[in-house]
Image: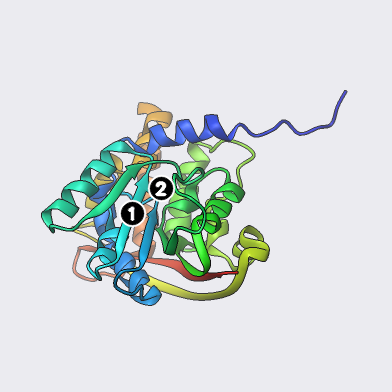
Amino acid sequence: MSGTTPAVDFGAITARQQETWAKGDFHEVARQVIGVSDLLVTTLDPRPGQRVLDVACGSGNAALAAARRYCEVSGIDYVPALIERAKLRAAAENTPIDFRVADAQALPYPDATFDVVTSVFGVMFAPDQAKAAAELVRVTKPGGKIGLSCWMPEGMVAEFFAVQSRLAPPPPGVPPSSRWGTEQGLRELFGSALRDLKMQRRTFHQQFLSSQHALEVFRKYFGPTVRAYEVVGAAGEAELSAELLKLYARYNRAKDGTFAGEAVYLESIVTRA
């Protein structure tokens, strides 16, 4: 009898994950973090003419922020509908951006292509974290910067995912995505490829008409929440809703009946060796 741990099938996990994130319409939630993307690009300060890649770009928030600086921008995501939405947004701004359907774990670009690489609450969800980090490094020029906005292991969003994971468990063998929101995790992931690391804990507020409205938006549009409700079914939906509303109540900073959910994340700037 062998004590060898079975290999994790990252390909199968990625396929299931892609299906989950394609549920609903993530853009309806991504609108809440436009400011996070703008701030990350401001911190990175890419110069006009530099090549910028937005990884797991969703509907294009960070890519658009970089393009407004007249950078040469590309963006990838593995959900085709989000890439189509990103293209529509870029066209509306008359902004040329090369958006492609692709996987963060297998970026379709040659080595050392980009001056700056960004990812806002995106690459952190790739199941093969070591491969995703290696791909970020591979496509970044030596001395270039990788800017990341990632959820931390504490706070409203971490607890939000924990509630859903408890009722709809993630596949075994995959480290928590919040690893990207810690210094130790980043140093493990980037290793010797990391020349310098600057980090800033940041706070912002997710704004909705009410806590109930926030729940309805996530339940309808946010793939992982849509999936969680499918898993628990009719018998468990009341419990899941009650837990999420209780969570929202603890983090709501609004005093007027609306919802201003306080969320914390780690903004990190990795300089590639």
Amino acid beneath label 2: Glu
Query: Which quarter shows the N terminus?
Result: top right
Q: Position of residue 4 (x, y in %)?
A: 81, 32
State the residue lying farthest toward the top.
1
Q: CA distance from mark 1 to mark 2?
A: 39 Å
Q: Is residue 95 visible?
A: yes
Left or right: 96 in relation to 18 = left
Find disc 1 in the rendering and name its residue.
74
Q: Position of residue 115 (x, y in %)?
A: 43, 66
Of pointers 1 and 2, the one earlier in the residue sequence = 1
Query: Which quarter shows the C terminus?
Result: bottom right
The label shown at residue 243 is 2
* Residue at left offset 57%, top offset 65%: 182
Say if mark 1 contacts mark 2, CB within 8 Å: no
SS assignment at label 1? strand
**Which corner quadrant of the image does residue 52 belong to?**
bottom left
Amino acid beneath label 1: Ser
Pick whichever, 112 or 255, lies toward us. Answer: 112
Left or right: 119 in relation to 28 = right
Q: Residues within 10 Å of mark 1 (few under 14, many from 20)?
A: many
The relative height of residue 198 versus residue 237 in the rendered view (above or below) is below
Q: Residues within 10 Å of mark 2 (few under 14, many from 20)?
A: some
SS assignment at label 2? helix
Q: Position of residue 243 (x, y in %)?
A: 40, 48
Pick whichever, 196 or 167, lies toward us. Answer: 196
Q: Nearer the viewer, mark 1 or mark 2?
A: 1
The label shown at residue 154 is none
Left or right: 259 in relation to 191 = left
Q: Is residue 212 visible?
A: no
Left or right: 102 in relation to 217 = right
Pick whichever, 209 or 13, lies toward us. Answer: 13
